[in-house]
Image: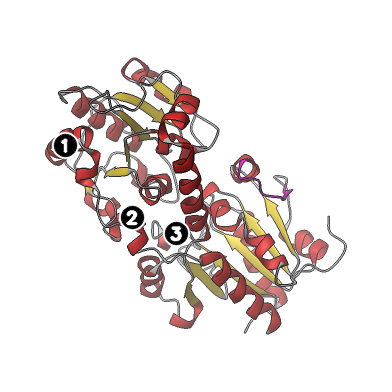
Amino acid sequence: MAGDTTDILIFVEDPGAANSIVDLPGALANRGLKAATVVAGHARPYLAQLGGRFTEADDSEDAAALLDAHRPRLVLAGTSENPDTLGLKLIAEARRRGIGSVGFVDGPASAEYRFRGRGADPLGFAPDRLLVPEDLTRRRFLKLGLAADRVVDCGHPYYDRVRAEGRNLARIGQTAIRARVLPEAPAPAPGGQPVVAFLAEVSEGLIPSGFQRGNDYTLAGRGGSDKRTDIVLEEVLDALAAVQRRPYLVLRLHPKNRESEFSAYRREIDFVSQGGAAIETAFAADLVVGMTSILLFEAAIIGRAALSVVPRPIEAEWLTGVGLGVIPAVHTRKALRDILPDAVADPARIMGTPAEKVIQFGALDRMADFLAGLVAGGGRS
């Protein structure tokens, strides 16, 4: 553990939170600040893959001991789907000690559960300040009762990284990337077999009932599974079966998924993509279909056609790209079967507002400047 005082102690547990802070320690160092990143859960392999430097927290890590070890002037914690996450405990312990705390979220989904923990108050573990990626998310937390001066729209640092990575991939070219990450897929060619990537997600989360079939579901699937992802995948598979030119179908697993979860559909899927840079799989595809994964928005940022398919209308609000008009969303079988043939035949036809027009790029500097200002003001200014 650290021996010297740390300016900012950063904690993340989920991949979405890791996306937000991977480049932040370097930006803070450029401002003369020392940051220490502590990681748990699924963020460990994910942040390592992104090239982040961190210390691992074990399952029994104690918030008080962690603060004693680092003696931070400010705590920065990402949210997690784990209601018992160390991040919330760090915020609570920082509050008890008079240490400033900042939280950050990567999108508007499940706002009322981000700082609830095991209690009933959606703001029970809310930090002194909250960093959000856009106004959609900001309005969610204002509606929950956070004061306007406590919620800061600084953009999402990962979007800058995604845009830069997209430009790098474009220089290499789709043909080369596809040959590397989807070696059995057909090469890009006019009139050739299109490649569709379906983005899997876990069928659990902060709102367990929201990831299982409910009375408000407008998609039914095949009836054999009540899992959210299974239902949507079944609808997509059946809709693709009716498309005149059958695409090459790739199932891209979420970092929390296991391939065995989708064994029932393996014969209908051409390739299962797991590990490596997920954005490369999205770039290699012609069309990216998913639910509310941030990877769907990343695909749109790098110029790929993206389609959100959700099992009930309210879930379209979970994905920033839908709210900003970048990604179209459907929630009924008819709408899916109406849009999918055009999306497969000519993906560009379904593309919405270009991401460049609605995203606030340059977020890393805004986040680092804001945090530096808090530290200079004693951590709670």
The magenta span reads: 49-57
**Circles 3 and 2 in contact, beta carbons < 8 Å:** no
**Residue count near mark 1 (Cα–Cα under 10 Å), binned few <14, some 14–19, many ≥20:** some
- Kind of residue at disc 2: Gly
The residue wearing badge 1 is: 342
The residue wearing badge 3 is: 113
- Kind of residue at disc 1: Asp
| Horizontal arrangement in the rendering, residue 155 relative to residue 369 (left or right) | left
Tag 3's secondary structure? Answer: helix
Q: Residue furthest right?
A: 3
Residue drawn at x 33%, y 63% as measured from the top left: 357
Tag nearer the camera, 3 or 2 = 2
Q: Where residue 2 sits: x, y (%)?
A: 84, 59
Tag nearer the camera, 1 or 2 = 1
Q: CA distance from mark 3 to mark 2?
A: 21 Å
Residue drawn at x 41%, y 34% as measured from the top left: 174
**Per the image, is 52 magenta?**
yes
Mark with earlier residue (3, 2): 3
Tag 2's secondary structure? Answer: helix
**Circles 1 and 2 in contact, beta carbons < 8 Å:** no
Q: CA distance from mark 1 to mark 2?
A: 20 Å
**Per the image, is 82 magenta?**
no
